[in-house]
Image (cartoon, rainbow, N blue to C red):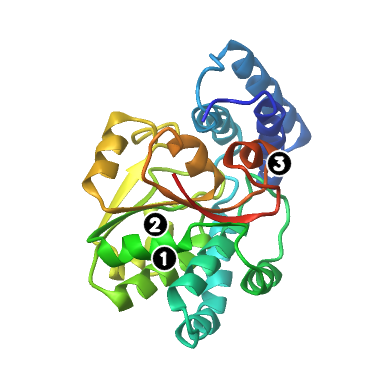
Amino acid sequence: MKLNLDCIPCFLRQVLQASRFSGVDIKTQENVLREVMKTLLEENWSKTPPELAHIVHAVVRRHAGDPYSSAKRESNAKAMELYPEMKKIVENSSEPLRVAAKLAIAGNIIDFGALETFDLEKTVKDVLARELDRDDYSLFRRSVEEGRRILYFADNAGEVVFDRLLLETILSMKKMEITFVVKAGPIINDATVEDAKEVELDRIVSEFRTISNGEVGVERNSPEVRKWIEEHDVIISKGQGNYEGLSEFRGIFYMLMVKCPVIAADIGAEVGDIVLVYR
């Protein structure tokens, strides 16, 4: 997905929020903003939004460390508190896969890049009571029934608990190999292998792979990731960042809550929509 000019002030909002979240002093916050503005002026804006996000958040980490490390652990813990009840809801449903998919989308509310605050429990209840605004579930179910290998691009810590529930639901239907893709290092509250293992995804995942946080790993729009996609039958992408980074590829199911007007316009939805859309 190409950069939209609205992404530029959004980057500044993100880095200021991250700097404040880290607890650094006002002068350091100012230094972060100044360096990010200078960096953005010097960068090529033909990069994708995730590529530029990697660059600006590297500035945050140099000045303020990993601002969301504690928040990620708290998000995992909170989601795990909800897990037993959500598991019962799925198992008691007449259509477990659809309910698990909706819950996976509800978990996408745990997003410190797009939001400053959110109510996880309220979001879960609201999403369960709603229909999907973009609904390619029938195709998704058919793909799962016919597929053998899942490539799953995860988004955020905490949210990975909801991903675990969806994958467990799929495995209750049939045996499949699961490749679970997370960030190679910290950026905002994106999940890493450590975060995924903290919620015991290593019990069901066949293999972990990593994509770049701007310092280590391959970019989402790289030939290597294209090869990963070609090697799997069912490709699932969670969240807005993965949508931005993977949207040039085809054959992907995107699951997300739309939180940004730029994403809304590109995907053909409205801010606030919950979508399971195939491209």
Nearest to N terminus: mark 1 or mark 3: 3
Q: Mark 3 points at which residue?
A: 17
Q: Mark 1 points at which residue?
A: 198
Instruction: Please name whichever residue, 44 or 247, is drawn nearer the observer in this view of the structure.
Output: 247
Q: Name the residue under label 2.
A: 194
Residue at image position (36%, 34%) is 216
Q: What element carries label 2?
A: helix
Residue at image position (43%, 32%) is 248
Q: Quadrant of the C terminus?
A: top left
Q: What element carries label 1?
A: helix
Taking 93 as reference, is 249 above or below it? above
Circle 1: residue type: Glu
Q: Is residue 156 left or right of residue 14?
A: left
Circle 2: residue type: Glu
Q: In this view, does 145 lie to the left or right of 278?
A: left
Circle 3: residue type: Gln
Residues marked 1 and 3 touching at CB (< 8 Å): no
Task: Check disc 1: other Cα within 10 Å, few if <14, some if 14-19, many if 20+.
Answer: some
Residues marked 2 and 1 touching at CB (< 8 Å): yes
